Amino acid sequence: MLIGKNIKLFFLVFVGFLFFSIQFFPVFAYDFELHSGLGDTGYEAGYDDVNLTEDNIPQLIGRIIRQVMLYLGVFFLALTIYAGFIWMIARGNEQEIEKAKTILKNAIIGLIVVLLAYAITYLFMDALSGVQADPETLD
């Protein structure tokens, strides 16, 4: 029963971490494009309605996927630490050691599956869009 409570506590802490680490976009009262005159200057220079300030849908989806991957990495790290902790306090108990090995093995398999899914998705999206994305510009 103690292990079930620990897993529930770990899940609640993880969900709380996700809830409190959501990045809210700041709201600015000053509209720089409207009040600075740069929009008029760009229009006069021939850059009509370029819309450089808004993200398009693929960039937004990419940022969401990157954020989810970050949380999955943190989750994998927590599972690894949890399995190591169980192994350390096993004191030679073979059942506890096997349990820790199983948790660690499943966490590694899950991480590999998630990374492969991300790589395959990135490959197909890159091939379908026909645009070579520079990872440094997507931050």
Image (spheres, rainbow, N blue to C red):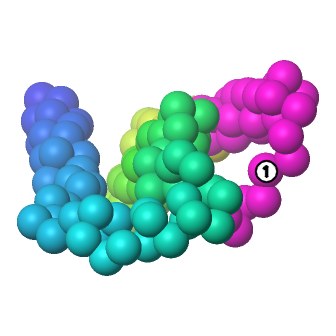
Point 88% across, 32% down: residue: 130
Q: Position of residue 66 (x, y in %)?
A: 53, 48
User: In this picture, which residue range is highlighted in magenta?
Assistant: 110-139
Does 135 lie within the magenta span? yes
Drawn side of residue 18 relative to residue 16, left or right: right
Q: Residue 39 lies in what quarter of the image? A: bottom left
Q: Quadrant of the N terminus?
A: top left
Left or right, 20 with respect to 40, comes to left
Q: At 54% across and 59% down in the image, what residue appears?
A: 43
Query: Across the whole image, how many numbered discs are drawn on residues?
Result: 1
Q: Could you say which is closer to the camera, residue 56 or residue 12?
A: 56
Q: Quadrant of residue 11?
A: top left
Tell me where residue 45 appears, x and y as whole percent. 64, 67
- The residue singled out by tag 1 in the image is 133
Q: Residue 30: x percent and y percent?
A: 16, 70
User: Residue 137 vs residue 93: left or right?
Assistant: right
